[in-house]
Amino acid sequence: MILGSPSSSCCGGIEHRSKRSSIRSLTDGAVDLPRIERAVREILLAVGEDPDREGLLETPARAAKAYATIFAGLSQSPEKHLGRVFHERSDDVVICRNIEFYSMCEHHLLPFFGKAHVAYRPDGQEVVGLSKLARTVEVFARRPQVQERLTNEVADAIATFLQPKGVLVVIEAEHLCMKMRGVNKQHADMVTTAARGCFVDDAAMRSEVISLMMQRA
Ligand SMILES: [Zn+2]
């Protein structure tokens, strides 16, 4: 394994250090936990609850910690994962299917979650570990999101850092803002796609890969 070109230059090293420190500081204060606690207490008051009753006493602190985890991707970069590549003379399509993810719809701050399927066609020189594709989904899912942007951001990150011949991302998700409120549709889900490079140009390859992605065991 060697370091990939996007991150192995000396400038990349400096950037890495600052990214690492911002990730580390997340747990020691980059996310303003007391501020979230105050806000959660306000919400409880605003909906008519008593935040001082026994069951809710620790809720603002617990919710603040949960938000720090749910939005941890805001201080992370996909470079950390996609900067590490293996030299491999292959340009056959690689698919990582059924990457489960949890995200938060930025319109309602309610969860949406499901599966991401990520395919790329290597440039014939470098491939990336499959777990790094899953980590990349994670980086973008753990932010206030909309599913369309999540799909595009994953595709663009892989296109940028791996410079492959093509990238195809398909995300299937259910949205609690559709199920718990609004139209109350319990069985609707949403599928989004983002294609780059050869998957834009070659419709036959695109549909072959999509059918492999959607195949159920
Ligand atoms: Zn929503």
Image (tube, helix red, strand yellow):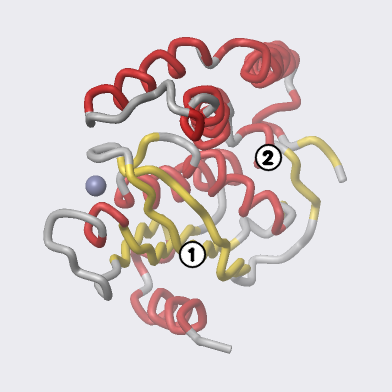
For residue 48, which quarter of the picture?
Answer: top left
Residue 193 visible in image: yes
Q: Which residue is labeled 2 in the image? A: 81
In the rendered structure, which amino acid carries the disc numbered 1? Lys
Task: Classify residue 54 as left or right of residue 192.
Answer: right
Task: Classify residue 131 as left or right of residue 115.
Answer: right
- Position of residue 16 relative to residue 159, above or below, is above
* Outermost residue toward the bottom in this view: 217
Task: Classify residue 207 as left or right of residue 158.
Answer: left
Q: Nearer the viewer, residue 46 or 188?
A: 46
Could you say where residue 69 lies in the image, as x and y percent from the top left?
Answer: 57, 33
Could you say where residue 120 lies in the image, as x and y percent from the top left?
Answer: 55, 61
Q: Which class describes the residues within 10 Å of circle 1: few (<14), some (14-19), or many (20+)?
A: some
For residue 36, which quarter of the picture?
Answer: top left
In the rendered structure, which amino acid carries the disc numbered 2? His
Quarter of the image for the C terminus: give it. Answer: bottom right
Residue 11 visible in image: no
Q: Nearer the viewer, residue 121 or 78?
A: 78
Q: Nearer the viewer, residue 122 or 117?
A: 117
Residue depicted at 75% across the width and 14% down the height = 10
Could you say where residue 148 lies in the image, as x and y percent from the top left?
Answer: 30, 51
